[in-house]
Amino acid sequence: MHRSELTIDLAAVRRNARVLLHSLEGSALWAVVKADAYGHGASDVAGAALGAGASALCVATVPEGLTLRREFTTARIIVMGPATNLEVSHAREARLELVVAGGEIPSGVRVHLKLDTGMGRWGLAELPEPPVEVVGLMSHLATADTDAAYAEWQIERFRSVTLPYSHLTRHIANSAGALRYPSARFDAARCGVALYGLSPFGTDPSEDGLEPALTWTSHIAQTRLLRSGESTGYGRRFIASSDTWIGIVPVGYADGFRRDLTGTTVRVGGEPRSVAGTVSMDAFAVELDRELPIGTPVVLLGRGVLAEDHARVADTINYELVCGINSSPQRARRMVVDG
């Protein structure tokens, strides 16, 4: 039995893509598959998204783009992060498209100019006259999930600055923009987190018709009865106030189940149970109401256990949680299903 198993449902990815396409009302969907598709597997997700109607793939680095190009020989692939001179040459040979946020605009490669409308990160302060290599104009929303007024201000700024060049492909919307801001849709939207069935707003994904594509499971490897006053884990953060059964799950922060998830809820044998005590590198404990057999299944994510709920406990975002899962064969078994 593996310590844990990761299952990626490509049918869920396709359903989420169709939800986004419906919301975009004619604007193109560009699937963001950077960081190994947020830990879901870039190649598998890219194929599912393209098959469901996405018209381009977005990555963060040229090496990510080159890896995808070997499998997706004709797909549009846009590299959103900076590229070195050598990487520009590789991108040119591989027919990747590059985002330029400063400096010289390279020749012989399709370029998207990035305008900083308020993110305060990558981006041009002013938009130059686009040369012939430029095929797109873009920006990035800073608060589409939290501050609608600021998001709308960014959208309007982008609209006014790019209006003279509306013959080029314009794109500013992320997942939150695609789902909530009709004014942000322009010609295309770059959607990542929603494609995986994760809420960009930190709420239940089903509120937006989204379905988590990742399920992470493990099992009870040991049970033990703590007598009143006995503890489990480092620092004795959980001390039994009365006789209490606990189960030990062979997953910890080295696997991506973070140390600050103490107190979150998982499902043990189909029932919600609280994580008790300190999460260690390779294991954590759950509080039980009775002794359970070794091998009882434990759901860490999926099947009603939401990354958004874990994120609130850990004071982070669902993006970080799924990107941090260790899917190496030495730690977990990874499976891809289709429906």
Image (cartoon, grey):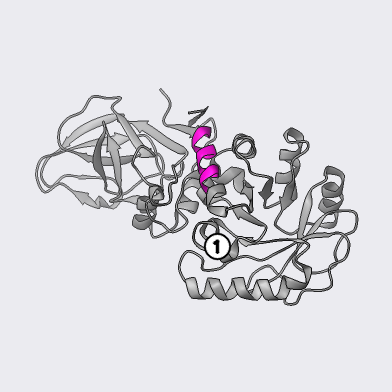
> Would you say the magenta stretch is mainly helix, strand or loop?
helix
Image position of 141 with respect to 49: above or below: below
Q: What residue is rendered at 67% in x and 58% in y?
A: 187
One can see residue 81 in this view: yes
Image position of 11 with respect to 317: above or below: above
Quarter in which the N terminus is drawn: top left
One can see residue 124 in this view: no
Q: Position of residue 328 (x, y in %)?
A: 54, 34
Q: What residue is rendered at 27% in x and 25% in y?
A: 294
Q: Quadrant of the rendered structure where residue 113 is?
A: bottom right
Q: What is the three-letter code of the residue carrying label 1?
A: Pro
55 or 87: nearer the eye? Answer: 55
Q: Quadrant of the rendered structure where residue 125 is?
A: bottom right
Mark 1 Cα shell of 10 Å, populated few (<14), some (14-19), many (≥20): few
Callout 1: helix, strand or loop? helix
Q: What residue is rendered at 41% in x and 57% in y?
A: 202
Residue 14 is covered by the magenta coloring:
yes
Image position of 38 with respect to 140: above or below: above
Q: Quadrant of the rendered structure where residue 173 is?
A: bottom right
Query: Taking 34 as reference, is 314 left or right?
Result: left
Q: Which residues are magenta?
A: 10-19
User: Which residue is identified by label 1?
Assistant: 182
Q: Position of residue 45 (x, y in %)?
A: 59, 38
Q: Position of residue 325 (x, y in %)?
A: 49, 43
Q: What residue is rendered at 55% in x and 46% in y?
A: 38
Query: Taking 242 as reference, is 285 left or right?
Result: right
